[in-house]
Image (spheres, helix red, strand yellow):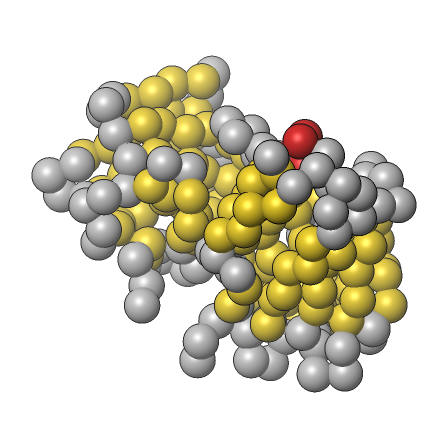
């Protein structure tokens, strides 16, 4: 079992560009959550996808969007990149049962640097 | 390849007593370690961290100990409270990149 896999591991982009990050959930999981972790801070919740729809959303602008595919994998898209978007982006997968997510498992993250 | 391991999936403690959560790692290049707490249906929240230049960091009821030679860290909660009941994740990274998480330990604090 590969667990949660994220790609790419590192990425450098220029201000104003767009970026797509990818996440494959752990086998048996149906829910994917995305987090942004700035240096020295805890992860900030971006959004969660379940059944190919955005189920919950944190306090992030519309520049941050996502998608979940029928195989439960997910993408995080960020448009019009700002320097402040530089962070470690974490994906976590889980199994949603009765509104509670079980087996929460993190990926190792994608380090995005905006220059 | 599990570089960070939390070998106890669950821990039950009486209110007022000490909770000790353990974490082992295999990569000697890790230089920054963190603990996160997660309540059901919520995302993880950062709890406490320690860098490899220290062997102890304390924040209120929470203390993290790092034993680099044993590649082991532990989180002590004293005194434990029912509100501490949650899943606790240990994480480790090198230069704050490529963060690796343990599988989590579910702590239950009984009143």
Where is residue A22 shown, x and y percent of the image? 63, 65
- In the displayed structure image, the side of residue B66 where residue B6 appears, left or right: right
Where is residue B43 shown, x and y percent of the image? 67, 47
Q: Is residue A75 above or below residue B98?
A: below
At horizontal 25% and vertical 29% (from top left) the residue drawn is: B52
Q: Is residue A54 above or below residue A44?
A: below
- In the displayed structure image, the side of residue A42 where residue A16 appears, left or right: right
Q: In which quadrant is the N terminus of chain A drawn?
A: bottom left
Where is residue B35 shown, x and y percent of the image? 45, 38
- Picture quadrant of residue B22: top left
Q: How many marks?
A: 0
- In the displayed structure image, the side of residue B59 where residue A66 appears, left or right: right
At horizontal 76% and vertical 77% (from top left) the residue drawn is: A69
Q: Let me know if residue A111 appears in the view.
A: yes
At horizontal 36% and vertical 36% (from top left) the residue drawn is: B95
Where is residue A17 shown, x and y percent of the image? 73, 47
- Picture quadrant of residue A62: top right
Q: In which quadrant is the C terminus of chain A drawn?
A: top right
Q: Let me know if residue B104 appears in the view.
A: no
At horizontal 77% and vertical 71% (from top left) the residue drawn is: A68
């Amino acid at each position: 079992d590969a667990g949660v896999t994220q790609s790419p591991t590192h990425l450098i982009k220029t201000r104003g560009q767009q970026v797509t990050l990818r996440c494959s959930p752990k086998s048996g999981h149906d829910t994917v959550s995305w987090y942004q972790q700035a240096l020295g801070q805890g992860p900030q919740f971006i959004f969660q996808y379940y059944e190919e729809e955005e189920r919950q959303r944190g306090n992030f602008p519309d520049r941050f969007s996502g998608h979940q595919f029928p195989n439960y994998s997910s993408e995080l898209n960020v448009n019009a990149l700002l320097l402040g978007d530089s962070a470690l982006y974490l994906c976590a997968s889980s199994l949603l049962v009765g509104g509670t997510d079980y087996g929460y498992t993190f990926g190792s993250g994608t380090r995005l640097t905006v220059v | 390849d599990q570089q960070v391991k939390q070998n106890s999936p669950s821990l039950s403690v009486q209110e007022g007593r000490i909770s000790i959560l353990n974490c082992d790692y295999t990569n000697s290049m890790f230089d920054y370690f963190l603990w996160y707490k997660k309540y059901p249906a919520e995302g993880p929240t950062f709890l406490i961290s320690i860098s490899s230049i220290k062997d102890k960091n304390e924040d209120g009821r929470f203390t993290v100990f790092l034993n680099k030679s044993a590649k082991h860290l532990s989180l002590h909660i004293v005194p434990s409270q029912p509100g501490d009941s949650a899943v606790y994740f240990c994480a480790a990274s090198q230069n704050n990149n490529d963060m690796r998480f343990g599988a989590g330990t579910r702590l239950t604090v009984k009143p």
